[in-house]
Amino acid sequence: MYIEKKDIDFFAKMFENPKKEGIKARIYTPDRELFHNTRDIERVQLVSPAQTLLDLAGLGYSGRDITKAMVEKYASL
């Protein structure tokens, strides 16, 4: 997920778990503007399909299947 720097502390405090259980979240601080071309779906702000595709491609071989599915979906948008 991408979170603006000003919101990282709030997110961390809101979801901290002293037992270290639950879902792990990987937080990225963007190095360029990502929030101007977002969509809200069920109160969740999503980056553009193009940014999602770039992120998935960056996973390398481990993200190959999901990247391929995203490419097929992106082609239909």
Image (spheres, rainbow, N blue to C red):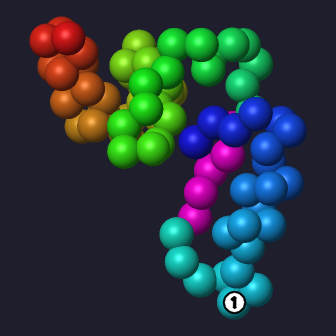
Q: Is residue 19 left or right of residue 6?
A: left
x, y (%) of residue 14? 72, 67
Q: Quadrant of residue 10?
A: bottom right
Q: Which residue is mark 1?
A: 19
Q: Is residue 30 above or below residue 32?
A: below
Q: Is residue 18 visible?
A: yes
**Is-magenta flag for residue 36?**
no
Answer above or below: position of 65 versus 10: above
Residue 42: image location, x then y, percent: 37, 45
Amino acid type, callout 1: Lys
Of 9 and 22, nearer the camera is: 9
Q: For the residue labelled by badge 1, is the local secondary structure a helix, a strand or a loop?
A: loop
Residue 60 horizontal side relative to residue 22, left or right: left
Query: Would you identify the image quadrant in which residue 62 lies?
Result: top left
Magenta part, dominant SS: loop
Q: Indicate left or right for 1 with 55 as reference.
A: right
Residue at 83% x, 36% y: name it.
5
Instruction: Say which quadrant the N terminus sits in.
Output: top right
Q: Name the residue: 59% across, 57% down.
A: 25
Instruction: Let me know if residue 27 is in the magenta part.
Output: yes
User: Which residue appears at 45% of the width and 44% of the height?
Assistant: 43
The spot of residue 6 in percent (x, y) is: 86, 38
Q: Which residues are magenta?
A: 24-28
Q: Relative to the observer, which residue lies in front, 32 or 63?
A: 32
Q: Is residue 23 above or below residue 60?
A: below
The quarter of the image holding the C terminus is: top left
**In this orientation, does residue 54 appear?**
no
Q: Residue drawn 16% across and 19% down?
A: 72
Neighbourhood count class around disc 1 (C-alpha, 10 Å): few under 14, some 14–19, many 20 upward: few
